[in-house]
Image (tube, rainbow, N blue to C red):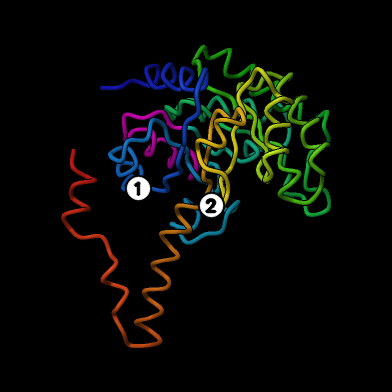
């Protein structure tokens, strides 16, 4: 049986060199399939989990998120990174308390965003963003868990920062104690390479998108970790919607020919 300590040690090792893809399951079945397909680590997706429970992203309360993380952590032998949104809190003290609760679910790492969810001011001021990461760092160190702390700079996603300001914030969050840095919305090779330099020697996570660079190309840029966010969930739900719509609106069943077979499902889910 792989213990949380084993998973955390493996997760830290993965971040030390090379480049790996960390896909995002949204339930136990998708997590187990991804393990069978050979991935080395997983990350939860707040959006995928929300959609699968009939809610929108950022609508899942803390208690439900913690229960989901515990279930997903126990589902496979792989390290799990928690998409922990903004720590489900504003103040550093509350972030630290919630991080401690997240560690109790068995996750191997967790990410903390600098997004406030305040429509009038979507990002925390840099000073507060830094203090929140420092609080998460202190909580992890106090537990002696060895969990990986990922700090996310969300300015590009919400249109609140340009690339230069986002890279400056990444550097500040790296100095605050984050083990891995992540700025969703970096697109061009030039900007990705600049982000790698901005946080070096710490690893950079890049969020992948349709038509973007390959794993090999990102590795050549110095990227250490590649995540997919809610993309796999959107791909799965997208095909579900298209197939169901074909039946509901056209009375046809042609798309069912593209469905996974029972044998394929059994092969991916076998113990």
Question: Toward which corner of the image does residue 244 lie, by quadrant?
Answer: bottom left
In the rendered structure, which disc, 1 or 2, sits on the residue that comes first in sequence?
Answer: 1
User: Bounds of the magenta span?
Assistant: 64-80
Circle nearer the viewer, 1 or 2: 1
Q: Nearer the viewer, residue 102 or 234?
A: 234
Which residue is labeled 1 in the image? Answer: 30
Q: Quadrant of the N terminus?
A: top left
Report the number of discs: 2
Q: Pointer 1: residues within 10 angstroms few (<14), some, or many (20+)? A: some
Residue situated furthest left in the rendering: 263
Position of residue 153 relative to residue 244, above or below, is above
Percent x, y of residue 140 = 57, 18
Q: Do the CB atoms of the residues marked 1 and 2 lie less than 8 Å apart?
A: no
Label placed on residue 47: 2
Judge whether residue 148 is colored magenta: no
The secondary structure that most of the magenta stretch takes on is helix
Q: Name the residue rendered at 50%, 28% in the picture.
A: 19
Using the numbered discs, state the Cα–Cα distance from disc 1 to disc 2 in whole angstroms.
14 Å
Q: Name the residue rendered at 22%, 53% in the picture.
A: 265
Please give left or right for residue 217 compared with residue 28 in the image: right
Judge whether residue 68 is colored magenta: yes
Q: Quadrant of the C terminus?
A: top left
Q: Nearer the viewer, residue 102 or 111?
A: 111
Q: Name the residue rendered at 57%, 44% in the picture.
A: 213
Question: Dot 1 lies on which element?
Answer: helix
Percent x, y of residue 229 = 53, 46
């Amino acid at each position: 049986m792989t213990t949380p300590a084993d998973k955390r040690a493996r997760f830290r090792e993965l971040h030390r060199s090379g480049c790996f893809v960390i896909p995002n399951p949204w339930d136990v079945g998708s997590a187990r399939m991804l393990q069978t397909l050979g991935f080395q680590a997983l990350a939860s997706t707040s959006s995928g989990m929300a959609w699968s429970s009939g809610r929108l992203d950022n609508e899942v309360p803390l208690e439900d998120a913690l229960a989901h993380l515990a279930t997903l952590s126990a589902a496979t032998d792989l390290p799990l990174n928690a998409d922990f949104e903004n720590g489900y809190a504003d103040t550093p003290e509350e972030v630290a308390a919630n991080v401690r609760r997240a560690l109790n679910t068995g996750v191997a790492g967790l990410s903390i965003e600098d997004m406030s969810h305040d429509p009038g001011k979507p990002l925390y001021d840099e000073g507060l963003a830094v203090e929140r990461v420092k609080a998460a760092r202190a909580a992890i160190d106090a537990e002696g868990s060895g969990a990986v702390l990922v700090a996310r700079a969300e300015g590009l996603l919400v249109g609140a920062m340009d690339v230069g300001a986002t890279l400056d914030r990444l550097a500040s969050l790296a100095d605050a104690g984050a083990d891995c840095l992540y700025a969703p919305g970096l697109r061009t090779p030039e900007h990705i390479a600049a982000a790698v330099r901005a946080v070096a020697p710490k690893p950079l996570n890049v969020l992948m998108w349709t038509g973007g660079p390959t794993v090999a190309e990102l590795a050549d840029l110095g990227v250490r970790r590649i995540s997919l966010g809610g993309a796999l969930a959107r791909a799965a739900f997208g095909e579900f919607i298209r197939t169901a719509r074909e039946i509901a609106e056209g009375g046809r069943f042609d798309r069912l020919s593209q469905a996974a077979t029972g044998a394929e499902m059994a092969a991916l889910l076998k113990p």
